[in-house]
Image (spheres, helix red, strand yellow):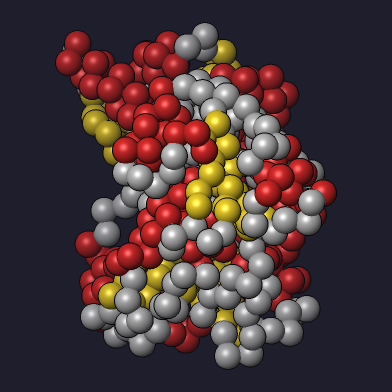
Amino acid sequence: MRKVVVVGLGKSGVEAARLLARGKDRVFITEFKDDKVTQDARDLLVAEGVVKLGNIELGGHTDKFIKTADLIVVSPGVRRDAEPIKWAEVRKIPVISELELAYTMCSAPIIAVTGTSGKTTTTTLIGQMLRSGGLDAIICGNIGNPFSGEIKKIKKNSVVVLEVSSFQLELIDKFKPRVSVILNISDNHLDRHKDMHEYITAKCRVFLSQDKSDIVFLNKNDELLSEIAGVIKNPKVEFFNEYKDLGRKYNILNEDFLAAMSVASFMGVDEAKMLEVLKDFKGIEHRLEHVANVRGVDFINDSKATTISSVGWALKSLEENIVLIMGGRYKGGDFGLLKPLVEQKVDYIISIGEARTQIKDGLNGVKPIFEANSFSEAVFEGFKKAKKGGRVLLSPGCSSFDMFENYKERGKIFKELVNEIRKSK
């Protein structure tokens, strides 16, 4: 019986612990935080018999569990330079991600989707298209339900459609998808990755163990990925922008849609079924989600846009007369890259959170910038400044952790504030 230490008690850590316990491993957990969320998670796992109360530590890491561990499983929110990982490396104890753990217990082929932006949309569409083609598609991963938590549902005839982040890919070993997809790569997570080289290297690990029988779909329009394609020996490389000429054939320009169609087509789904899925697709919550129209002003919730490139995609997707709410915890990158789109589409910028200085530095002088003292002030100010026929767009370009638990909470509160405005008018 192995002694396995799970580092981190978020969703992935909880599901990793459950999976390990089902496999008869002795589970230990170490978590830096000590708040209601982590306490509730601890109490639940103890009640389920997953772990003994004395085998969980909250509020900081010690090396008492690590010393005699056989394996360390790391949640994606834990940095690679965290103390438990350093202690394990000194003692030469294997360290893997929750993604790798689940992979070792998965009997089905995997489609792994990564990239700086568009992962959730593409992963969702691939899953829906496969299901429309009669396949048992299990959609999971970074999309919200951890891979470890889905293992019990996966059969040999299933197909796992997995959204994977750079954090999850850092600590894989043998993870080998049948199909991998890299949608795009731009500045992101530079608050965690040392530099862009490290971030790019992490993303490219998705095809690290693939062989000639596998396939990776890349974006021909992404200069960096186009260069990377030229040096990949294994797996087989295809560009989803060109695959089977689907874009020209059906006049589809959206790269997320083309990536999904390419994968589904490779997996044998009929093109007519794929088009039906696109026709019925309502989008993803918190991704360019139309919330309400109040006195001729549309409110758009794009809280999931945590990168500068995602903000650019949102601006390209909408008509002009936009009041843009941006900010949060800065993740790196140059807001100045948005200048052409801001100049063309945006009337007014409202900045929030810790990244206000970086937003001002990048976009000062392009359009007026108002620095809001609170999220509610930003939303109400946005409505005041919006023109009739225009829109208030929450597209932060930053993580939410300076003000919220996650992007979902940020989007939820945005919708609640919009509802307050609607009721008051």
Q: Is residue 65 above or below residue 394?
A: below
Residue 8 in sight in this render:
no
Q: Quadrant of residue 302?
A: top left
Number of numbered discs overlaid on the protein picture: 0
Q: Position of residue 39 (x, y in %)?
A: 42, 27
Q: Position of residue 269 (x, y in %)?
A: 32, 83
Q: Nearer the viewer, residue 10 or 236?
A: 10
Q: Nearer the viewer, residue 107 or 194?
A: 107
The image quadrant where one finds the C terminus is: top left
Q: Is residue 89 above or below residue 156?
A: above
Q: Nearer the viewer, residue 187 or 109?
A: 109
Q: Nearer the viewer, residue 59 or 190?
A: 59
Q: Quadrant of residue 285?
A: top left
Residue 93 is left or right of residue 328, and the answer is right
Q: Position of residue 304 (x, y in %)?
A: 45, 41
Q: Which residue is depicted at the point 70% across and 29% down? A: 362
Residue 338 in sight in this render:
yes
Q: Is residue 373 above or below residue 215?
A: above
Toward the right, the furthest residue is: 90
Q: Which residue is depicted at the point 51% across and 80% down? A: 178
Q: Quadrant of residue 127?
A: bottom left
Residue 174 is left or right of residue 411, and the answer is right
Q: Which residue is depicted at the point 76% across and 43% down? A: 87
Q: Position of residue 175 (x, y in %)?
A: 59, 70
Q: Which residue is depicted at the point 38% across and 40% down? A: 45
